[in-house]
Image: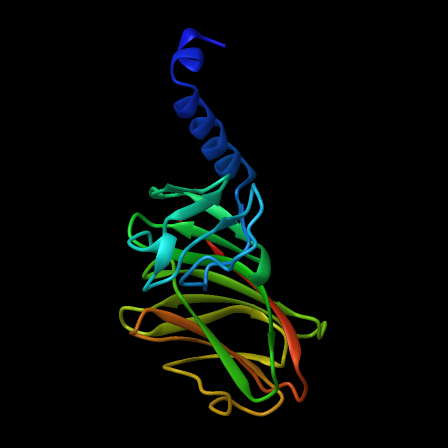
Amino acid sequence: MGSGSTDHPGIYTETVNRLDALVNASVIDRDLTAPPGGETNGDVYIPAATATGDWATHEDDIAHYWDGWIFTTPVDGFRLWVEDEHAIIAHDGTNWRTLEALVTVADDAAVSYDAPDTFGLITVATDDVDGVGIMWFETAVATTLKLAGATNTEVTTGALVGTTGNDVKLTLSAHTNGKVYIENRLGASAEVRFRFLGAP
């Protein structure tokens, strides 16, 4: 170790702890607005808006606990694994975007995610072996094109509410609100894995 670690042990320790959080690249949760309590050294979160208590003013920062909270402001392109969502997220310089996730969608229900860009590709697969599709989308003008998919996969535009598409179908959609929707009308709850391709 250099002399800096001896002269400024606090700075050295914080640097090592911050590096620990960023190299592991995994967070426990990103939906909490305050520390959950009972933290142990090494726990990492992303405080949600509007953060309070020890997390106040640190919304969307990376909060790493090591005998106290250490905060790191993310930069464009930074990627993390979110444990409770089984998701990979990336920061676009302004917001965190979900790039890939495994979600359970109830029958006659829909989920939506902010698209990481105004256009791109999304792949969707379900635990139903026939429920696989690839869609090109553009949110600015709400355009979709089915590039591949089984007979029970279709595409449309606009917001999906759970009963918008056809029965016995998995429907993908793009909306001018910047979101991509996945609707499940397969007849039963389904695990859906999706991935945005070509995203930042």
Q: Quadrant of residue 28?
A: bottom right
Q: Is residue 86 visible?
A: no
Scheme of colours in the image? rainbow
Please determine whether, in this image, residue 173 is positioned above or below residue 123: below
Q: Residue furthest top?
A: 3
Please determine whether, in this image, residue 116 is positioned above or below residue 76: below
Q: Nearer the viewer, residue 3 or 161?
A: 3
Side of 24 where 128 appears, left or right:
right
Residue under the image location 49 percent in, 32 percent down: 17
Q: Nearer the viewer, residue 70 or 145?
A: 70
Residue under the image location 63 percent in, 80 percent down: 151
Point out residue 67 in the picture as x, y percentages from the top left corner.
50, 39
Please determine whether, in this image, residue 42 is positioned above or below residue 102: above
Residue under the image location 50 percent in, 10 percent down: 1
Q: Is residue 31 visible?
A: yes
Q: Nearer the viewer, residue 87 or 152?
A: 87
Point out residue 140 in the picture as x, y percentages from the top left corner.
27, 68
Point out residue 64 in the picture as x, y percentages from the top left corner.
47, 43
Point out residue 9 in the picture as x, y percentages from the top left corner.
43, 20
Please determine whether, in this image, residue 146 is positioned above or below residue 183: above
